[in-house]
C-alpha cells in the first residue's frame, strides 16, 4: 500500500470530528451496552464500525454499519487514491473520501 502510517492517520483525522455525547439513551437494541454507540451513530450520521454480527443484522433503520476489516480496506483505498495524486472531496460535511457502509 502506498503511503505510511502518518498518511493513514491523516486520512482518519480528515474523516473524524469530535461531538458531544448523546443526552438521552433509550433502548435501541437488545444489548443495553450497545445503545450508547448506536445513539451516537444515529445522532451524528456516522458509520458504526463493529465486529458484532448481531448489530450488522439487527440494526435500527437508517444506521450504517460496517466491520473493522471493511473500514481498514476503505481507509487503505483512500490512502492509495491520495497517493495517486487525486484530491479528495467532501461528503456529509466532512473533508475526505466518503466511506460507504456494508
Image (cartoon, rainbow, N blue to C red):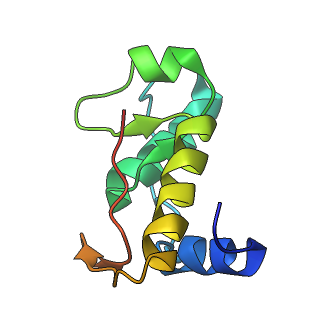
Which residue sits furthest right? 5
The C terminus lies in quadrant: top left
Say whether residue 29 is left or right of residue 8: left
Tell me where residue 22 appears, x and y as whole percent.
Answer: 47, 59
Does 22 appear above or below 2?
above
Tell me where residue 71 appears, x and y as whole percent.
Answer: 54, 46
Residue depicted at x 63% and y 28%? 51
Query: How many numbered markers are drawn?
Result: 0
Which of 77/20 is in front?
Answer: 77
The N terminus lies in quadrant: bottom right
Tell me where residue 18 appears, x and y as whole percent.
Answer: 53, 77
Residue depicted at x 39% and y 56%? 46
Which of 96/60 is in front?
Answer: 96
Does 51 appear above or below 2?
above
Which of 102/21 is in front?
Answer: 102
Q: Quadrant of residue 36?
A: top right
Does 49 appear above or below 31?
below
Say whether residue 4 is left or right of residue 69: right
Residue depicted at x 36% and y 41%? 101
Tell me where residue 79 appears, x and y as whole percent.
Answer: 54, 69
Q: Quadrant of residue 87?
A: bottom left
Work out whether residue 30 can be spotted: no
Work out whether residue 98 can be spotted: yes
Amino acid at each position: 500500500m502506498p503511503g505510511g502510517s502518518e498518511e493513514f492517520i491523516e486520512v482518519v483525522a480528515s474523516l473524524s470530528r469530535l461531538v458531544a455525547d448523546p443526552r438521552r439513551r433509550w433502548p435501541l437494541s437488545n444489548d443495553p451496552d450497545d445503545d450508547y454507540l448506536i445513539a451516537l451513530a444515529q445522532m451524528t450520521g456516522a458509520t458504526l464500525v463493529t465486529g458484532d454480527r448481531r448489530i450488522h443484522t439487527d440494526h435500527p433503520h437508517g444506521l450504517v454499519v460496517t466491520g473493522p476489516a471493511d473500514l481498514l480496506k476503505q481507509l487503505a483505498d483512500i490512502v492509495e487514491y491520495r497517493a495517486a495524486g487525486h484530491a479528495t472531496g467532501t461528503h456529509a460535511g466532512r473533508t475526505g473520501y466518503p466511506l460507504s457502509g456494508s
